[in-house]
Image: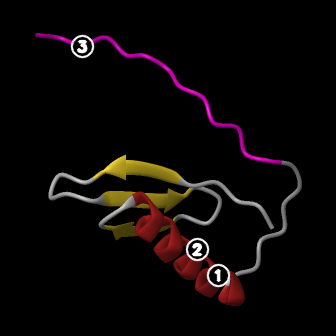
Amino acid sequence: MELSAVLTPAIEGGYIALNPETGTTTQGESIEEALVNLQEATELYLEEFPLNFTGRSLLTTFQVATHA
């Protein structure tokens, strides 16, 4: 099963990893570590709460106005 991963830099260093389909979140010191941790966390989640969906997630971006 192919799922999505969103990685963002953590304030304290490393990366925060999120799987939007399940809501699982974890972190790691590197991108690779964060992805391995996310895979493990998501597999554990799916053992308890299997997903029943078709199709793929769509990732896009949008802009918001910033105020100085």
Residue 50 relative to residue 32: left or right: right
**Residue 55, position as x, y percentages in the image:** 87, 49
Q: Which residues are magenta?
A: 56-68
- Cα gap from disc 1 to disc 2, whole angstroms: 6 Å
Residue drawn at point x = 47 percent, y = 76 percent: 37
Q: Is residue 29 above or below residue 15?
A: below
> Which quadrant: the N terminus?
bottom right
Does residue 8 appear to the left or right of 24 in the view shown? left
The outermost residue toward the left is 68
Of residues 51 and 33, the one nearer the viewer is 33
Q: What label sits on residue 34 in the rendered view?
A: none
Residue 29 lies in what quarter of the image? Answer: bottom left
Going by the numbered disc 1, the residue's amino acid type is Glu
The residue that disc 2 covers is 39
Residue 3 spot, x, y in % from top left: 70, 59
On-image quarter of the C terminus? top left
Residue most extreme to the right:
54
Q: Is residue 16 left or right of residue 54?
A: left
Point 52% across, 73% down: residue: 36
Q: Amino acid at mark 2?
A: Gln
Q: Helix, strand or loop at disc 2?
A: helix
Residue 58 sits above or below residue 41 on the image: above
What residue did someone put label 1 on? 43
Q: Which residue is mark 3?
A: 66
Is residue 65 magenta-colored? Answer: yes
Q: Is residue 35 left or right of residue 68?
A: right
Query: Dots 1 and 2: beta carbons under 8 Å?
Result: yes
| Crowd rating for badge 3 (residues with CA inside 10 Å; few <14, some 14–19, many 20+) | few
Magenta highlight: main SS: loop
Residue 57 falls inside the magenta stretch: yes
Residue 50 rendering spot, x and y as whole percentages: 76, 79
